[in-house]
Amino acid sequence: MLSLEDKKLLDLLQKKFPLVPRPFAVLAEQAGLSEETVLKKVAEWQQAGVVRRLGPVFDSKRLGYQSLLVALACPKSELEWVSAIINAYPGVTHNYLREVEDGWPLRYNLWFTMTGASAQEVEENLTEIAKLTGQDDLLRLPAHTLYKIRVQFDLLGNQGQQAVESKFTPPPNPGPATLTQQDWALIEAFQEELAPITEPFQPIAAAAGLESAELLDRVKELQKNGVIRRFGATLKHYAVGFGSNAMGVWAVPKDRENEVGQIMASFSAVSHCYARSTYAQWPFNLYTMLHSDSREGCWKIAAEIAEATGVSDYHLLFTVQELKKERMNYRAPRRHN
């Protein structure tokens, strides 16, 4: 159980992590705690997995990487060994077993993301997976519009299920950024977890061949140009009171896709909202990740979204098991080596 004090600190870690030489001292002052207490709590949360990741969240596209959501229909009797093969690929960062309804087309129960240095690498890996597993009933679901990605949980109950704004402006979706060799040294150094120590940026800066002040200035610049989406803690939602999550798949008329996507993204309980490709056997083009403390809560949010958008053709695919969830290990392209 998390105390109110814990929730306040975790909220700060998620949303207001200071990019200063002694960030935990600043957080301690904001939370009304000692720096020693904050360092101890963060270390415990990292060890227990409450804090999955502490550091920058990179935008794979801005780094020149390609990412693809894949849905695979796998017989229950073969799930264990098929998922083991899929999870063995370093480019698979997330893999979930989702609860599906009987019947066509709701048979896709394994959902994973494949990331690679190029579209060709991603496609080669998917072809290999199909060959190794004998499972070729899969959907490639590239995102063509991002409406929202904000994996930050409201631990203090300050927001309702729907944000104040009635519309959500889609973030820009630029291509790969121009990165220097020094930038890549910084990015690779940040593949290590930020440690709960007095000056956590020092070892990262040393690994990148920079002074701490230089590192922090460059982090702020990379955040400004979208290479770093945000800097802070990524929490394990099950551990902070959001025990139920579901992927909502919505069949929306193409001419309403942008309008509806923005409305969906305005809901605070929606952490991700994308428009993706469709197939004859899979008509769902908008995707929302919903988080709540219960299944009933997810259904209630979905009903509110349906009412707000007028979209009634949707399904919720609840997470049954988290088979893999890891950060991508980003490395410089060969031309920088």
Image: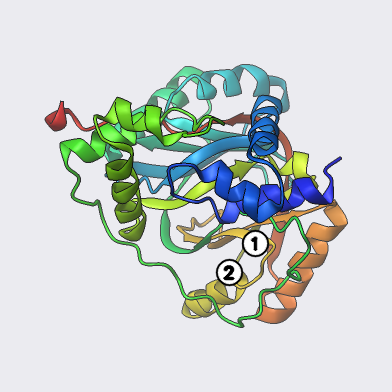
**Mark 1, residues whose alpha carbon is within 10 Å: few (<14), some, or many (≥20)?**
many
State how the image is colored. Answer: rainbow
Of residues 30 and 185, which is closer to you in this image?
30
Residue 129 in percent (x, y) is at 45, 24
Of residues 220 and 96, which is closer to you in this image?
220
Could you tell me the amino acid type at mark 2?
Ala
* 128 on left or right of 236: left
Total numbered badges shown on the rendered structure: 2
Task: Quadrant for the C terminus, please.
Answer: top left
Contact (CB < 8 A) between labels 1 and 2? yes
Residue located at (47% from left, 80% from top): 255
Residue 201 in percent (x, y) is at 41, 35
Residue 167 in percent (x, y) is at 56, 80
Residue located at (71% from left, 59% from top): 154
Residue 117 in percent (x, y) is at 29, 35
Task: Quadrant for the N terminus, please.
Answer: top right
Instruction: Please give the residue where the numbered disc 2 appears in the rendered image.
Output: 265
Q: Quadrant of residue 268?
A: bottom right
Visible residue check, residue 104 = no
Q: Secondary structure under badge 1?
A: strand
Instruction: Please give the residue where the numbered disc 1 appears in the rendered image.
Output: 270
Could you tell me the amino acid type at mark 1?
Val
* 254 on left or right of 123: right
Q: Secondary structure under badge 2?
A: helix
Residue located at (51% from left, 60% from top): 274
Mark nearer the N terminus (1 vs 2): 2
